[in-house]
Amino acid sequence: MPPWPGRHETSDIVFEDTESTLTSLFINAGYLDEELWAGAHPKYFIEVKATTKECGDRFFMSRNQLRMVCETIYP
Protein backbone atom coordinates (compact mmCIF):
# COMPACT_ATOMS: atom_id res chain seq x y z
CA MET A 1 0.00 0.00 0.00
CA PRO A 2 1.46 3.39 -0.92
CA PRO A 3 1.94 6.08 1.75
CA TRP A 4 -1.16 8.12 2.59
CA PRO A 5 -0.69 11.64 1.15
CA GLY A 6 -3.31 13.29 3.37
CA ARG A 7 -2.87 14.76 6.82
CA HIS A 8 -5.44 12.47 8.44
CA GLU A 9 -6.89 9.09 7.75
CA THR A 10 -10.47 9.32 6.45
CA SER A 11 -11.84 5.97 7.69
CA ASP A 12 -11.08 2.27 7.89
CA ILE A 13 -13.13 1.51 4.77
CA VAL A 14 -14.06 3.85 1.91
CA PHE A 15 -16.74 2.41 -0.36
CA GLU A 16 -18.18 4.13 -3.44
CA ASP A 17 -21.61 2.58 -3.91
CA THR A 18 -21.61 2.83 -7.71
CA GLU A 19 -24.44 0.30 -8.07
CA SER A 20 -26.45 1.42 -5.02
CA THR A 21 -26.04 -2.05 -3.49
CA LEU A 22 -25.14 -1.05 0.07
CA THR A 23 -27.62 1.82 -0.05
CA SER A 24 -30.39 -0.62 -1.01
CA LEU A 25 -29.46 -2.87 1.92
CA PHE A 26 -29.68 0.11 4.28
CA ILE A 27 -33.06 1.09 2.81
CA ASN A 28 -34.42 -2.46 3.16
CA ALA A 29 -33.18 -2.63 6.77
CA GLY A 30 -34.96 0.63 7.58
CA TYR A 31 -31.81 2.75 8.13
CA LEU A 32 -32.39 5.06 5.14
CA ASP A 33 -35.53 6.67 3.74
CA GLU A 34 -36.33 5.08 0.38
CA GLU A 35 -37.82 8.30 -1.02
CA LEU A 36 -34.53 10.12 -0.42
CA TRP A 37 -31.99 7.37 -1.11
CA ALA A 38 -33.38 4.99 -3.76
CA GLY A 39 -30.91 4.85 -6.65
CA ALA A 40 -28.35 7.07 -4.87
CA HIS A 41 -24.62 6.37 -5.25
CA PRO A 42 -23.01 7.81 -2.10
CA LYS A 43 -19.45 7.34 -0.98
CA TYR A 44 -19.44 5.64 2.44
CA PHE A 45 -16.71 6.26 5.00
CA ILE A 46 -16.97 3.31 7.39
CA GLU A 47 -15.14 3.27 10.70
CA VAL A 48 -14.75 -0.15 12.31
CA LYS A 49 -15.02 -0.38 16.09
CA ALA A 50 -14.74 -3.60 18.05
CA THR A 51 -15.05 -4.74 21.63
CA THR A 52 -14.31 -7.93 23.48
CA LYS A 53 -17.43 -7.33 25.59
CA GLU A 54 -21.15 -7.17 24.86
CA CYS A 55 -22.58 -5.52 21.74
CA GLY A 56 -24.27 -2.82 23.82
CA ASP A 57 -21.04 -1.70 25.49
CA ARG A 58 -19.56 1.71 24.78
CA PHE A 59 -16.90 2.24 22.19
CA PHE A 60 -14.38 5.05 22.07
CA MET A 61 -13.31 7.38 19.31
CA SER A 62 -10.68 10.08 19.16
CA ARG A 63 -11.51 13.79 19.14
CA ASN A 64 -10.31 13.92 15.54
CA GLN A 65 -12.71 11.12 14.53
CA LEU A 66 -15.60 12.94 16.20
CA ARG A 67 -14.59 16.22 14.53
CA MET A 68 -14.53 14.56 11.10
CA VAL A 69 -18.00 13.04 11.67
CA CYS A 70 -19.44 16.37 12.79
CA GLU A 71 -17.86 18.24 9.84
CA THR A 72 -19.31 15.67 7.43
CA ILE A 73 -22.82 15.83 8.88
CA TYR A 74 -22.84 19.60 9.57
CA PRO A 75 -20.44 21.19 7.05
Image: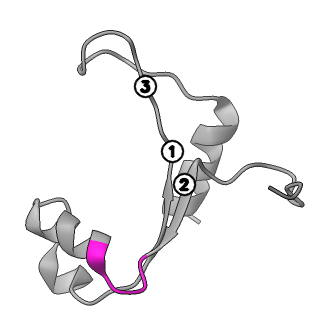
Which residue does the numbered mark 2 point to in the structure image?
13
Q: Position of residue 18 (x, y in %)?
A: 42, 85
Instruction: Name the secondary structure under disc 1.
Output: loop
Instruction: Name the secondary structure under disc 3.
Output: loop
Q: Position of residue 35 (x, y in %)?
A: 15, 85
Q: Residue furthest bottom?
A: 39
Q: Is residue 28 left or right of residue 61?
A: left
Q: Are marks 1 and 2 in contact (CB under 8 Å)?
A: yes
Q: Residue 51 is drawn in which quadrant?
A: top left
Residue at 30% in and 15% down:
57
Marked residue nearer the N-terminal end (1 or 2)? 2
Tell me where the magenta segment starts and ends, as one range. 17-21
Q: Is residue 56 left or right of residue 5?
A: left
Which residue does the numbered mark 3 point to in the structure image?
50
User: Quarter of the image containing the C terminus?
Assistant: bottom right
Local crowd at mark 3 within 10 Å, few (<14), some, or many (≥20)? Answer: few
Which residue does the numbered mark 1 point to in the structure image?
47
